[in-house]
Amino acid sequence: METVQRLRAMALLCRQSAAHHPDRSWKLLAEAEFWEHMASAALLEHFKECAASSNDVMQPQRTANSNDAHRIAAA
């Protein structure tokens, strides 16, 4: 998450610079868009990793059913 914050901070700096340098604003705004895109990609990757790790932790458990009782009684 720290990476996302840093990438968004870079985008903010580019937008602020664009406001102070109108002659270069198109380039700075394009760069801000790039940093925002990178932040979105990093955030998506973070959530994918979280989802994958939670799936590893929460493996489905076998539950008892009525057929198990018949198997135990037959044994």
Image: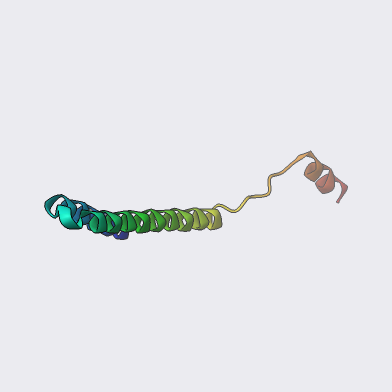
Q: Nearer the viewer, residue 10 or 68?
A: 10
Taking the image as shown, residue 40 lies to the left or right of residue 6, namely right
Furthest residue to the right? 74
Taking the image as shown, residue 52 lies to the left or right of residue 20, namely right
Taking the image as shown, residue 3 lies to the left or right of residue 66, namely left
Percent coordinates x, y for residue 50 in the rendering: 45, 55
Q: Nearer the viewer, residue 3 or 68?
A: 3
Furthest residue to the top? 66
Percent coordinates x, y for residue 11 in the rendering: 25, 55
Residue at the spot 48% in from the left edge and 55% down from the top edge = 48
Identify the image quadrant of residue 42. bottom left
In the displayed structure, would residue 9 be above or below residue 71? below
Percent coordinates x, y for residue 44 in the rendering: 43, 54
Residue at the spot 84% in from the left edge and 43% down from the top edge = 70
Q: Nearer the viewer, residue 36 or 19?
A: 19
Percent coordinates x, y for residue 1 in the rendering: 32, 56
Q: Can residue 1 be seen at all in this image of the molecule?
A: no
Residue at the spot 27% in from the left edge and 55% down from the top edge = 32
